[in-house]
Structure formats: structure tokens, C-alpha cells
Image (cartoon, rainbow, N blue to C red):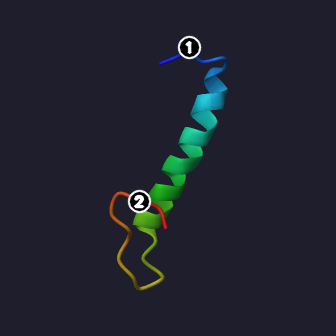
Amino acid sequence: MKPLSSVSDFIEPFCERELSIIDQVHDTDNGSKPVAFGVS
């Protein structure tokens, strides 16, 4: 593992991905089951 040049280079993409997963888990309007442990 190498040192991070910038914490924001890690945090921003990580948070975007996590928010996308959360949105899919909570999305019940489309009538389908959420994708388990993944993002469609």
C-alpha cells in the first residue's frame, strides 16, 4: 500500500460510490429488488 498524495483523491470517489449504493438500496419506486453488494 502506498501513501496517499491527497486524502480527497480517496474520499471523494469513495463517497460517490457509497452514496450510489445507498440510493439503489433505498430505491423502491422501480419495483425491482436492489442489487446485493453491487451497483448496476
Find residue 22 and report its image quarter: bottom left
Lower sequence index among marks 2 and 1: 1
Q: Hey, which residue is sitting farthest bottom in the picture?
A: 31
Give the residue at mark 2: 38
User: Compared to 12, does 29 lie above or below?
Assistant: below
Find residue 12 and report its image quarter: top right
Q: Amino acid at mark 2?
A: Gly
- Label number found at residue 24: none
User: Compared to 29, does 36 lie above or below?
Assistant: above
- For the point 42% across and 66% down, which residue is it? 26
Of 14 and 19, nearer the camera is 14
Q: Secondary structure at mark 1?
A: loop
Q: Position of residue 13 (x, y in %)?
A: 61, 41
- For the point 47% across and 62% down, which residue is it? 39
Of 39 and 1, nearer the camera is 1
Q: Position of residue 32 (x, y in %)?
A: 39, 82
Give the residue at mark 1: 3
User: Compared to 33, does 25 lie above or below?
Assistant: above
